[in-house]
């Protein structure tokens, strides 16, 4: 059944499921379905067990077992330096940002913290709206709640860490997001393999998730991201993921950041 779960994860989520995670899902299904009779060959005629497996994918339960939700505040600070460089062009206007595969929301909150800090230093503030989605319903509920353990704030030398001070309150080894930061962030559940009908974004952060997709599924993911990105808009991937981007709409760009950062590559949407 583990192989079946991995195939379904590929078909429906586009991802390479870890076999250990697949086995955990299998154990959950065996413990919660009405039968322990499973076939090694998947057919729609299978009774309760496979019906339960199908429902676990359609309901979002499978994603809770099969997706990776590693996240922390201001991870890969070079991208936040890039965002800081881009903000002046949006002064006295509104910027729409998407945090795709946001996990538990630390990225979305980091973006909001940075924009709030920027607005305190300028006369014309940047108005902003952040949409943040993930396929994992548990992760999205955690993001909405805004309560994190100590691993969410790491001493990794990020020069942006100070921006968390006004918005994170620590109590009993937990960090609590200040409610004032939530007003411009919309968290919701969405599968990257599906199109999203929304107003288009100026910037999409899609970091450290692309590597989990099968190569033959990546073009579909990039097409769906292109669909929701404005022409001339920017797509930002994880620092180790840029080699895998091959799509007609995305042209690699290079920006020389201050000496304290490495050079950063990002992608700009350019229609053919």
Image (cartoon, helix red, strand yellow):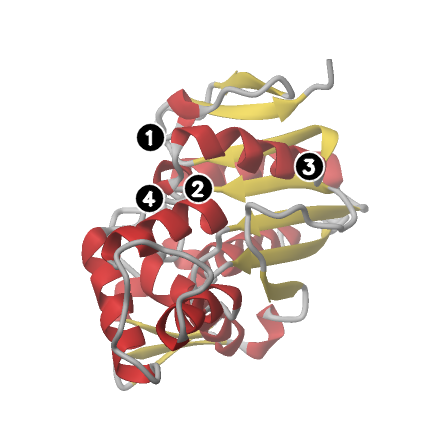
Q: Is residue 85 above or below residue 263?
A: below
For the C terminus, the quadrant is top right
Horizontal side, residue 26 vs residue 222: left or right:
left
Q: Which residue is mark 1?
A: 240
Kindly identify which numbered label has been placed on residue 88: 3
How much space separates mark 3 and mark 4, taking CA atoms? 39 Å
Point 67% across, 46% down: residue: 195
Query: For the residues carrying marks 2 and 3, which lies nearer the camera in this image?
Result: 2
Q: Which residue is mark 4?
A: 16
Q: Which residue is mark 2?
A: 207
Query: For the residues carrying marks 3 and 4, which lies nearer the camera in this image?
Result: 4
- Whether pointer 3 and pointer 4 mark residues with C-beta atoms closer than 8 Å, the reply is no
Point 36% across, 47% down: residue: 7
Most extreme residue toward the left is 20
Q: Residues within 10 Å of mark 1 (few under 14, many from 20)?
A: few
Q: Is residue 71 visible?
A: no
Please name whichever residue, 76 or 269, is drawn nearer the observer in this view of the structure. Answer: 269
Residue 85 position by quadrant: top right
For the N terminus, the quadrant is bottom left
Query: For the residues carrying marks 1 and 3, which lies nearer the camera in this image?
Result: 1
How much space separates mark 1 and mark 2, taking CA atoms? 9 Å
Query: For the residues carrying marks 1 and 4, which lies nearer the camera in this image?
Result: 4
In terms of sequence position, does the residue under pointer 1 or pointer 2 come before the other? 2
């Amino acid at each position: 059944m583990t192989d079946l779960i991995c195939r379904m994860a590929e078909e429906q989520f586009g991802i390479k499921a870890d076999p250990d995670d697949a086995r955990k899902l299998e154990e959950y299904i065996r413990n919660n379905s009405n039968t322990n009779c499973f076939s090694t060959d998947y057919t729609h005629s299978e009774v309760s067990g496979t019906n339960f497996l199908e429902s676990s994918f359609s309901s979002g339960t499978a994603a809770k077992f099969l997706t990776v939700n590693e996240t922390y505040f201001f991870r890969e600070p070079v991208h936040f330096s890039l965002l800081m460089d881009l903000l002046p062009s949006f002064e006295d206007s509104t910027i729409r940002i998407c945090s795709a595969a946001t996990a538990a929301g630390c990225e979305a909150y980091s973006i909001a913290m940075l924009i709030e800090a920027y607005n305190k230093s300028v006369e014309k503030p940047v108005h902003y709206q952040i949409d943040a989605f993930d396929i994992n319903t548990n992760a999205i509920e955690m993001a909405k709640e805004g309560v994190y353990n100590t691993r969410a704030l790491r001493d990794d030398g990020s020069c942006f860490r100070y921006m968390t001070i006004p918005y994170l309150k620590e109590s009993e080894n937990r960090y609590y997001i200040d409610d004032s930061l939530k007003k411009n962030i919309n968290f919701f559940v969405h599968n990257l393999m599906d199109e999203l009908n929304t107003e288009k974004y100026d910037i999409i952060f899609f970091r450290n998730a692309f590597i989990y997709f099968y190569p033959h599924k990546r073009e579909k993911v990039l097409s769906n991201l292109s669909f929701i990105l404005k022409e001339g808009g920017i797509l930002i991937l994880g620092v180790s993921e840029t080699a895998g981007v091959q799509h007609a709409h995305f042209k690699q760009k290079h920006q020389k950041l201050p000496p304290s950062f490495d050079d950063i590559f990002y992608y700009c949407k350019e229609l053919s």
